Image (tube, rainbow, N blue to C red):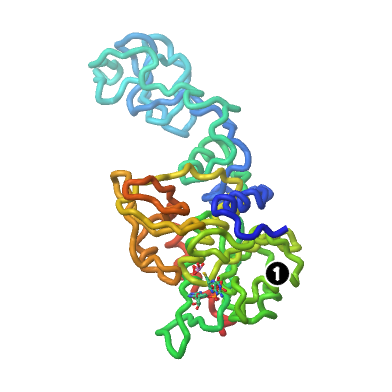
Amino acid sequence: MAETHLSWAAARAAASRAARPLEPTVRPLGDALGHLLAARLTALTDLPSFDTSAMDGWAVAGPGPWRLPKDGGGVLAGHGDAGPLADGEAVPIATGARVPPGATAVLRSEHGTVRMDEELYASRHLTQGQDIRPKGQECQAGDVLLPAGTLVTPAVVGLAAAAGYDQLRVVPRPRVEVLVLGDELLREGLPHDGLIRDALGPMLAPWLRALGAEVAQTRCLGDDETALRAALEASDADVVLTTGGTAAGPVDHVHPTLRRLGAELLVDGVAVRPGHPMLLARLASGRHLVGLPGNPLAAVAGLLTLAEPLLRALAGRPSARPVAARLTEPVAGHPTDTRLVPVVRRGDGTARPLSFHGPAMLRGLAAADALAVIPPGGTVRGGEALLLTFARHAEWYAERHDEWHEAAGGGAP
Ligand SMILES: Nc1nc2c(c(=O)[nH]1)N[C@H]1C(S)=C(S)[C@@H](COP(=O)(O)OP(=O)(O)OC[C@H]3O[C@@H](n4cnc5c(N)ncnc54)[C@H](O)[C@@H]3O)O[C@H]1N2
Ligand code: MOO
């Protein structure tokens, strides 16, 4: 049953309860980046997997001076082994090479002198095991290296490779399709004749990626009820995000279309400004739809209130640790609803509320790095406010920078 005008906190909680994590998949190491580990990462090998020289120099056995092999032979990394060393013997060795059995330390090249081609003298005292990385020092086969749910970063990929993995079991990133509604929207050029630029199509895809989603496509459907219905029926995305058309105006088709498709409204309106017409529905297919209001700041409020916790739930990511800041200015509250106000954070734990925060405006948002959550009644100067911080994953923005323009190639009103 639809829950109408939930409080802001209840709406977020409903969105995070709405879905279970997607089925894990196995991906080659390089393709696992940015996903979450579906299972804990256990070492498939000891690390190091053999006693390893940490320096270029000589492997030595017992106290010096040492005899070097007459043939001048030595051990290089990855090039086979030297025979065992007896007390008083030494052999040249390279960093990363396997230390021969019987060696008690590695003498660095800068700390040794060779006389008469075969006698090695140390200029420093050597301790037992010096500059040898013993097998299993970092981990032993079977050790748990990282818990399930860890984000696969470049360093995690490196660790997994070192520990013997070719592929990883991960929770896939949720796939999102963005449907931009509105006959008044232009995709290029200057506004004219009552038409305005679509600000949401270009903004949402990179923002969704920064929230950990994969954006299947962004389509502009105009105010066409039939096209909306067909798009919802055809979509195989985990989440469909619509923009505009959430209110009860003559061409606001989201509610009637959801009704016709037998969708279940999980959240139908939220006591939040801007963005109160936002909604969350479960389609007959079991997939989810987040309806964002058309006003741009209201749409971002919906993105961070409903889509962000839903995407987290689908990706199996735990909630982020709450971040708070003291406000440098008082912010008036709405009598009954939560307000979301763009702020810029400062290094001293404070945040400055920005102007140009009207529902239809983006100027404040573009200068902001968080939305402050202002409870009904407002927050005084110096008062603490919870922040919804904006994820900054520059590589995701950069990587797909041009994609929206390509994806938006057809279906324009
Ligand atoms: N009688 C009432 N009318 C409205 C109410 C209300 O409570 N009673 N609520 C207002 C609020 S608040 C909002 S928010 C909007 C939500 O409306 P929709 O989600 O149906 O959005 P639209 O009507 O399609 O558009 C609203 C506004 O935003 C502009 N827009 C839409 N899409 C984009 C886009 N992609 N890029 C830039 N701007 C966009 C659109 O032109 C409208 O100006 O309803 C109010 N009405
Ligand atoms: O959601 Mo509306 O902001 O309140 O424009």
Which of the pair 178/353 is nearer the observer?
A: 353
Callout 1: 10 Å neighbours few (<14), some, many (20+)?
Answer: many
Q: Position of residue 271 (x, y in %)?
A: 55, 58
Count of numbered circles in the view: 1
Which of the pair 300/403 is nearer the observer?
A: 300
Q: Is residue 180 visible?
A: yes
Q: Quadrant of the C terminus?
A: bottom right
Q: Position of residue 206 (x, y in %)?
A: 48, 63
Question: Which quadrant of the structure image shows residue 102?
Answer: top left
Residue that numbered label 1 is attached to = 258
Element carrying mark 1: helix
- 219, above or below 192, in the image: above
- Farthest-out residue, bottom: 193
Query: Which residue is depicted at the point 54% across and 64% down?
Result: 276
Query: Which residue is depicted at the point 45% across and 90% down?
Result: 193
Q: Is residue 311 visible?
A: no
Q: Position of residue 162 (x, y in %)?
A: 51, 37
Query: Which residue is depicted at the point 37% across and 56% down?
Result: 331
- Judge from the rendering whether residue 342 lies leftward or rightward of residue 227; answer left or right: left
Query: Which residue is depicted at the point 39% across and 57% down?
Result: 332
Q: Does any atom of ligand 1 lie closer than 8 Å to the CB of label 1?
A: no
Q: Position of residue 96 (x, y in %)?
A: 42, 31
Which of the pair 244/85 is nearer the observer?
A: 244
Q: Quadrant of the N terminus?
A: bottom right
- Judge from the rendering whether residue 366 lies leftward or rightward of residue 307; answer left or right: left
Question: Which quadrant of the structure image shows residue 266?
Answer: bottom right
- 223, above or below 202, in the image: below
- 3, above or below 166, in the image: below
- 102, above or below 325, in the image: above
- Judge from the rendering whether residue 111 lies leftward or rightward of residue 372; answer left or right: left
Give the residue type at disc 1.
Answer: Leu
